[in-house]
Image (cartoon, rainbow, N blue to C red):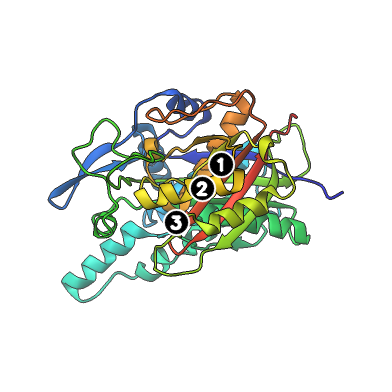
Amino acid sequence: MAQPITITSIASISPLGNNEEDIWASYQNVNHLFKKVTFGDRPAWVGSLSESGRLEIEMLRNSNSKYQNLDDSVLYGIFSARRAAAYAGWGENENFGVNIGSSRGATGLFEKYHNEFLRKGSTAVLTSPTTTLGNISSWIAHDLKSKGPNISHSITCSTALHAILNGVAWLRSGMAEKFLVGGSEAPLTSFTIAQMRALKIYAQEDNSEYPCRALDLDKGKNSMVLGEGAGAACLEFGIGKNALAIIEGLGFATESLEHNISLSADAQCLQDSMLMALGSIDRKEVDIIIMHAPGTIKGDTAEFAAIQKVFGNSIPSLTTNKWKVGHTFGASGILSVEMAILMLQYQRFSGVPFMKFNPPHKINRVLINAVGFGGNAVSILLKNPKN
């Protein structure tokens, strides 16, 4: 029997915080973490880094002159990767791969340099190298002095879970012994907010109790809120003392495309990805599903319909973290993985305060969903290594 692949460490930075204690404490709080920020002449709810998180990033930026010109998405990735590698005990010059993706990449820098070009008709020397998507993994590999391959990719909102797929594939192929995977996103810019508003999916500014109604199947308005952050996880063979979760199942699928952002009414791609991840495992053995649930009417209801099709009368406890931190695009999947690991560790369900789902009696298996524009779905099944 093949050795299982486990997650041996995970670290993140987001509105939840930047260390396990603060992040878990944030999950126990029934309040959202959004702030109202003005973009142009109009305010919008956003999930921005905590004050301590912002300070950590500024310290990182100022620690090396070469980091001064990097986009926030790169710095968020470096911060998370450093901590994940340290928690796993990975040192410099080790042979591990890096795959940290992003939906949008260097959003802030790209907009800054493009505005400069419109004003001056020219742009700065570092424009091209600092706005390429490959910046994230290559800078992380440089920072950690890893000797393995480094890969950056964008598969919209399922990017981070695709990184886990890639890491597992490299390990199973025998071409790597360890892999660092995750996602990073810094999308809180005027142009990005305007894009979401153009799609008619962004939350209204007047709803302050819970601006993002992710998982509320009865909401009458779309309520997506953008957030920023990054996360990184270390993948290794075997169930050692530091194993946080066993990757028990992997699934992926693509929707038949009818529109650039469309999902079928019952999210066929998610049905297929969940079925692949579950394999022969009894549906009743899954205790929790962390839904993608972006807070849009169609997105949330389609995913719930897919879960109904797959699980029938044995639907697990359902949850999401987007009501609290917002949609972090390419980083959202790894933040969901972190949420799953924390629930496995603490054996406590973290629900959605305005939704009533019975908490599970035990937490042994958690299924995580992600789906991006164009219907690129990934499902990851995690198992408690202690059972």
Cα–Cα span, label 1 and label 2: 6 Å
Q: Is residue 88 left or right of residue 81?
A: right
Q: Which mark is residue 381?
A: none
Q: Residue at x 38, y 55 (%)?
A: 71
Of residues 183 and 205, the one drawn nearer to the viewer in this rendering: 205
Disc 2 residue type?
Answer: Gly
Residue 97 seen anywhere in this rendered image of the structure: no
**Sequence order check: which comes first, mark 3 or mark 1?**
3
Q: Residue at x 71, y 36 (%)?
A: 243
Quickly name the residue at label 1. 337
Q: Picture coordinates of residue 173 (x, y %)?
A: 76, 61
Quickly name the residue at label 2. 333
Q: Are marks 3 and 1 in contact (CB under 8 Å)?
A: no
Label 3 Cα neighbours within 10 Å, binned few <14 / some 14-19 / many ≥20:
some
Quickly name the residue at label 3. 265
**Sequence order check: which comes first, mark 3 or mark 2?**
3
Q: Are marks 1 and 2 in contact (CB under 8 Å)?
A: yes
Q: Is residue 260 left or right of residue 382?
A: left
Q: Nearer the viewer, mark 3 or mark 1?
A: 3
Q: Are marks 3 and 2 in contact (CB under 8 Å)?
A: no
Secondary structure at numbered mark 3: loop
